[in-house]
Image (cartoon, rainbow, N blue to C red):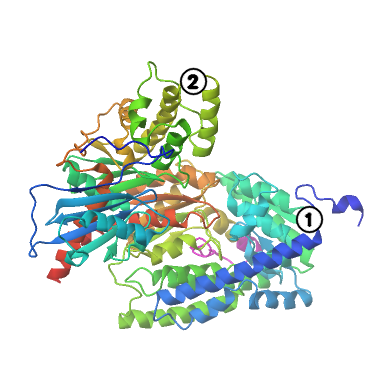
């Protein structure tokens, strides 16, 4: 896949919506074809699985209407696969809008789904998952099967989340997908901004810019503050290796590398999601949901 | 009265028009909340016991009970309100007065309380202040005097603020429980309170009257425990229904409450025989502990747990808005005045598991009580509920968690506020916790 497209107009926050179909995979009507639809506050993700293997997925921006966003994401994932929605044996909805996924047979929280999805992407060695979503962050401890052992969630404010990063992309006029790299282009790491609240951090950042700080330095200070907040949450839930990061911010190298430095722990390598065969950690919740869908379908068949 | 006596030391002067307008708006909203809560509770259990009808009615804070108390007041009875459970209600009853608890569960009034104290202060207190400012709470308004037990810092200062409106009798409760001097001190407080109540009501608390009042409490405790025991097995009553019954005790007529609770238990026993469960017996069994949850608005958590997907059922709680109200009987040896007062003192101090206490081994009573509850009520997960600003419960969490970790029972710390804004977020937390409890079965 090519590098993300250039910014349209002045929408620096806009990240790329894309669809993927895994090469060399075929399906037949005998297969257990399931789907997971993860309607987050910022992005909607849908994944199709064939017998528990990721086949295709789509990522779109969540609109003001959850049911529509869910359909949009699912149709996106189905596009070009030859599959129809009616071919799906079981659908699990997850994410903030999980109760508003009209085609879902069941809703499961994104906490359980990200746990399961992280286990799917990285394998049984994962014990701690940090999911940085659009409007909240969650630190989840899991066992070797991907089951949740305990979890913590930040409170209702959007600090340290994907949405906060979008706000900063606009403020600094840097395309969102370059934000991680640019935040690392500082000779010396500056002090983190003191406010992690998005509204106040914005004011603080504007002050720093007026003081003559470069965009890179301001971004580094903000990213650092976010990373501290996320690392605190991980420490509170209790860090056990291996650690992985899911959700949109897993793609922000500025956040990931800072968390690694603060915690003194490497995260498991990021799958090559830009390549044709790589799984995408932003879709972890949808993968997990599709796996639960398979388990639930099989359970229902047995009953 | 002279002008100085009318001057409020803490709270702002509000124009009568504003008070009346705010009260009528918030009261109307509250009545809708009450009706909605009851409706949802009815829906949750298709075979809801007949006896719940009585408690649904008594749950209307602006309804029957308010009118009854008003009628008694007109006949000359005094109403004595209280905040913390340590107020010796038997003494109030023995003086022919009416005890009512006046803590506020209204979300909307906590915003008014913000005009008096900062938002960092516990919302239970802010809400009580706000309710007083607009004269919303029937029972607080009807109270002729208030007993304020100085438990947490918030309660201590709340009593000062409420002194703008009512006579306040502070009771100084010792923080170290397991010492003879503490108990001696507290017993003196109880004796002093007896004199205070007698003077205020003009009624002498006789030996006979006090014995009667203690016996009334005994019968209530018996019914109360019977109800909690019925929650030990496969569920025959929704947690919310039981919690409402428990809480209604603090404003209801004690004898009638006992009668109605016994009737409810009779029904539940039949239900148990019929094996007519309110939900599948494998529904995750949850215990709630932490900050008290007051009717009507702060019914958020129990509603979420019992309407979640997957669903949970609350089988027990360890809260002063719930099982702490009546769990412990007053242990009288001889029915002499002295012995009865001593027994009252011991019951209120020694039996309480409020986190305001400490002892040689920290608040060990609370830990033991929780572990015992978890075991006997077959609890699968504990929700540790804390509102922001509730420091004592927040600080005791780590110890409780360690104790539960040891016996391998999951616990989840849920912090919230007096607001409806975080319901979506709380729902995700609660559901993820319940999924964790059911995961072993499902996947």
| Location of residue A240 in the rendering, given as x and y in whole percent from the top left corner | 26, 36
Q: Could you say which quadrant of the image residue A187 lies in?
A: top left
* Residue B335 forms part of the magenta stretch: yes
Q: Is residue B179 above or below residue B127?
A: above
Note whether B70 is above or below B3 in the view shown: below
Q: Are marks 2 and 1 in contact (CB under 8 Å)?
A: no
Of residues B133 and B153, the one drawn nearer to the viewer in this rendering: B133
Q: Nearer the viewer, residue A105 or A79?
A: A79
Mark 1: secondary structure: loop
Q: Is residue A283 left or right of residue B201?
A: left
Q: Residue at x 75, y 59 (%)?
A: B196
Checking the image for residue B281, the label placed there is none
Give the residue pinned by disc 2. A213
Q: Position of residue A195 (x, y in %)?
A: 51, 32
Magenta segment: does it hold B386? no
Q: Which residue is mark 1?
A: B14
Start and end of the magenta stretch? B322-342
**Label 2's element?**
loop
Using the image, name the chain to which the residue with label 2 belongs: A
């Amino acid at each position: 896949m090519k590098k993300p497209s250039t910014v349209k107009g002045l929408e620096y926050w806009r990240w790329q919506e894309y669809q993927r179909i895994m090469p060399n995979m075929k399906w037949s009507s005998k297969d257990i074809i399931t789907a997971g639809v993860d309607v987050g506050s910022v992005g909607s993700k849908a994944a199709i699985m064939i017998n528990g293997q990721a086949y295709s997925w789509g990522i779109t921006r969540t609109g003001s209407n959850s049911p529509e966003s869910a359909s949009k994401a699912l149709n996106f994932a189905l596009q070009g696969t030859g599959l129809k929605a009616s071919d799906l044996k079981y659908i699990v909805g997850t994410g903030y809008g999980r109760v508003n996924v009209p085609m879902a047979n069941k809703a499961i929280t994104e906490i359980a789904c990200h746990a399961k999805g992280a286990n799917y992407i990285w394998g049984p060695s994962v014990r701690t998952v940090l999911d940085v979503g659009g409007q909240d962050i969650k630190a989840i401890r899991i066992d070797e099967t991907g089951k949740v052992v305990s979890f913590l969630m930040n409170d209702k404010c959007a600090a340290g989340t994907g949405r906060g990063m979008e706000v900063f992309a606009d403020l600094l006029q840097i395309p969102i997908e370059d934000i991680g790299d640019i935040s690392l282009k500082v000779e010396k790491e500056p002090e983190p901004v003191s406010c992690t609240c998005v509204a106040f951090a914005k004011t603080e950042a504007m002050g720093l810019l007026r003081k003559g700080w470069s965009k890179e330095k301001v971004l580094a200070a903000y990213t650092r503050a976010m990373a501290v907040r996320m690392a605190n949450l991980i420490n509170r839930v209790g860090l056990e290796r291996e650690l992985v990061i899911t959700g949109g911010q897993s793609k922000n190298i500025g956040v990931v590398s800072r968390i690694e430095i603060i915690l003194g722990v490497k995260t498991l390598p990021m799958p090559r999601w830009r390549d044709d065969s790589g799984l995408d950690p932003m879709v972890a919740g949808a993968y997990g949901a599709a796996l639960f869908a398979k388990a639930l379908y099989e359970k229902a068949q047995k009953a | 009265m002279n002008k100085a006596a009318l001057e409020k030391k803490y709270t702002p002067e509000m124009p009568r028009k504003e008070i009346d307008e705010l009260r009528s708006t918030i009261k109307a909203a509250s009545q809708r909340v009450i009706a909605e809560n009851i409706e949802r509770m009815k829906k949750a259990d298709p075979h809801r016991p007949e006896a719940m009808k009585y408690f649904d009615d008594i749950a209307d804070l602006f309804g029957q009970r308010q009118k009854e108390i008003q009628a008694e007041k007109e006949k000359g009875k005094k109403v004595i309100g209280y905040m913390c459970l340590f107020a010796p209600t038997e003494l109030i009853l023995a003086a022919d007065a009416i005890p009512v608890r006046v803590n506020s569960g209204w979300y909307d009034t906590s915003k008014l309380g913000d005009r008096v104290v900062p938002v960092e202060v516990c919302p239970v207190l802010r809400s009580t202040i706000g309710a007083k400012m607009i004269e919303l709470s029937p029972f607080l308004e009807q109270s002729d005097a208030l007993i304020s037990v100085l438990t947490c810092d918030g309660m201590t200062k709340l009593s000062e603020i409420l002194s703008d409106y009512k006579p306040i009798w502070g009771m100084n409760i010792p923080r170290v429980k397991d010492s003879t001097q503490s108990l001696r001190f507290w017993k003196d407080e109880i004796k002093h309170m007896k004199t205070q109540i007698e003077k205020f009501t003009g009624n002498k608390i006789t030996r006979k009257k006090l014995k009667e009042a203690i016996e009334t409490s005994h019968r209530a405790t018996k019914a109360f425990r019977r109800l909690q025991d019925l929650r030990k097995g496969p569920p025959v009553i929704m947690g919310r229904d039981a919690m409402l019954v428990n809480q209604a005790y603090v404003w209801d007529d004690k004898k009638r409450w006992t009668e109605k609770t016994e009737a409810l238990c009779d029904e539940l026993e039949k239900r148990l025989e019929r094996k007519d469960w309110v939900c599948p017996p494998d529904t995750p069994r949850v215990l709630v502990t932490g900050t008290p949850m007051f009717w009507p608005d702060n019914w958020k958590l129990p509603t979420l747990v019992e309407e979640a997907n997957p669903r949970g059922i609350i089988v027990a709680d360890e809260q002063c808005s719930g099982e702490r109200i009546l769990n412990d009987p007053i242990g009288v040896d001889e029915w002499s005045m002295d012995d009865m007062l001593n027994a009252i003192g011991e019951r209120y101090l020694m039996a309480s598991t409020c986190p305001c206490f400490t002892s040689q081994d920290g608040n060990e009573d609370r830990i033991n009580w929780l572990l015992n509850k978890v075991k006997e009520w077959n609890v699968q997960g504990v929700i540790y509920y804390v509102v922001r600003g509730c420091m004592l419960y927040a600080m005791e969490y780590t110890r409780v968690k360690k104790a539960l970790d040891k016996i391998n029972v999951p616990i989840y710390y849920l912090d919230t506020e007096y607001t409806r804004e975080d319901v979506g977020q709380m729902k995700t937390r609660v559901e993820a916790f319940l999924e964790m409890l059911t995961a072993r079965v499902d996947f």
